[in-house]
Amino acid sequence: MTAFERIFTPTNIIFMLKGAGYSLLIAICALIGGSVLGLLAAMGKMSKRKIPRTIANVYVEVIRGTPMMLQILLLYLGGPVITKALFHFVYTPNPVLIGTIAVGINSGAYTTELFRSAIQSVDKGQWEAAQTIGLSRIQTLKEIILPQAFKRILPPYINEFIVLIKDSSLLASIGAVELLHSADVLGAKYYNYLLPLLFATVAYLIMTLNISHLARKLERRLAESD
Amino acid sequence: MINAVHISKHFGSIKAVDDCSLHIRKGEVICIIGPSGSGKSTLIRCLHGLEIPDSGELYVNGKKIDFTRDTTKELSHIGFVFQLFNLFPHKTVLENLTLGPIKAGGVPEKDAVETARKLLARVGLTDKENAYPAQLSGGQKQRVAIARALCQSPEVILFDEPTSALDPEMIGEVLNVMKELADDGMTLAVVTHEMGFARKVATRVIFVDNGKIVEEGTPDQIFDNPQSDRLKLFLSQVIHM
Ligand SMILES: Nc1ncnc2c1ncn2[C@@H]1O[C@H](COP(=O)(O)OP(=O)(O)OP(=O)(O)O)[C@@H](O)[C@H]1O
Ligand SMILES: [Mg+2]
């Protein structure tokens, strides 16, 4: 039996595909969580008041100024230490969950700028008109500003999704189930890293190339509707 | 109805509005005139919290407005019409009109639509309810904006140069709508360069220069018997144009 036949059994292929599914899932959840954080931080940055502005700035600068790997390790290893010191409470962190949260927090700092520039690209008069008809700031954002900012956000937003699919591979280091981790596990099992890693390469490419292809199609469709 | 008392507003070192007091009473049609950069826009925007005055007080129906809080709800019964219309481009004409009443006013959609249709008829745009703003002419956009303001059941409508961005042939249709509102007893305060409109429709004309209210009176007093040199100079320049 060749190495190829030994490694790419149906069971192992399903094992790897499951890892790819987790990578996608982690990226989607981190993107959603990160968008909520990013939107909040963008609002904070644009706030007239100092406290929300400061909080948002510190968040963005700290996250963007430190390595993502460090953030993941801090959250994964540091979390239980902190809860033990503060509440005498120890837990075993779930790597996928903690990892997704870490990637989401990281992504939020990058989408902040995205949201902020897209929101600021909408004419100030739109905020003013909404104010004169009695809409709150949140209503204005939801009904007036974001729908208009959407077209501008979409291309870089999809790019962020691709970045997250790739970034989620960092979670292999804390043992979270995802594509790179699955490849690593198989590699160790069969003393052959090359083939599982090549499989992962192809799987990452299939995901990222398809998504950017979809993004270009969507962009074209949006451009036509102008 | 709206009473602004000793309002001032700076932008950096520029005193855009300098200690202005203005009391708008029910049924009045006030035209605010003055040279470019004199602070007319800033003054009228202060009356709707679009600019927050640095000092002075604003009373609406006797109630003092606290600008340290969110004043949006409190001032939503004051209409505002912008020079550049500020319609919502991704919403149809009808949605532009009903958004405020439905989302902010809690009016049931059916009632809001019915009111909006009536008001669209009033500005002569019944056939445009499903159009998007980009499909309208400037004059039509501004009439939609007026109808949108009317949907707030406003006690007074403030206008900031409503015809300045329009092609000459469209100015008339907007001024006509405004004149009809005035004839129906609506309270209006209008920043304008349309001296003909001010003379014919205004009950009171206010001349602003350098952030200050320099002179005010009936159209006859202001246009035929100006007192201050600055107003005389301004009028001579406008008439020469
Ligand atoms: N947001 C702002 N930031 C800085 N300066 C401003 C701002 N808005 C107005 N100003 C300044 O305040 C002064 C008054 O401006 P304002 O727009 O109120 O004048 P106006 O009478 O409406 O002029 P116009 O007839 O040209 O519309 C001007 O010197 C203007 O440059
Ligand atoms: Mg102006």
Image (cartoon, coloured by chain):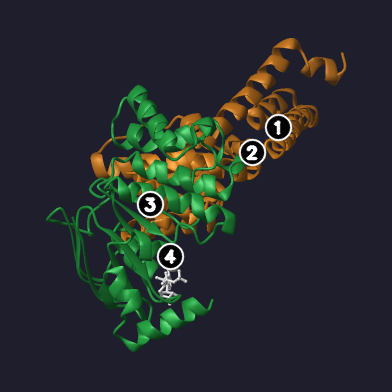
Quadrant of the rendering where the N terminus of chain A is positioned: top right
Secondary structure under badge 2? helix
Q: Is B59 on the left or on the right of A184, as rendered?
A: left
* Callouts 1 and 4 on one subunit: no
Three-letter amino acid code at the position of disc 1: Ile
Circle 4 packing at 10 Å, graded few (<14), some (14-19), many (20+), is few
Q: For residue B66, what is the image quadrant?
A: bottom left
Q: Is B41 on the left or on the right of B89, as rendered?
A: left
In the image, ligand 1 is in what quadrant?
A: bottom left
Q: For residue A150, what is the image quadrant?
A: top right
Name the N-terminal-most of marks 2 and 1: 2
Residues at marks 2 and 3, CA–CA distance in whole angstroms: 51 Å
The chain under label 3 reads B
Residue A224: mark in rendering:
none
Q: Give the labeled residue for mark 1.
A: A211
The chain under label 4 reads B
Residues at marks 3 and 4, CA–CA distance in whole angstroms: 12 Å
Q: Give the labeled residue for mark 2.
A: A158
Chain identifier, colour orange:
A
Residue B196: mark in rendering:
4
Circle 3 packing at 10 Å, graded few (<14), some (14-19), many (20+), is some
The chain under label 1 reads A
Chain identifier, colour green:
B
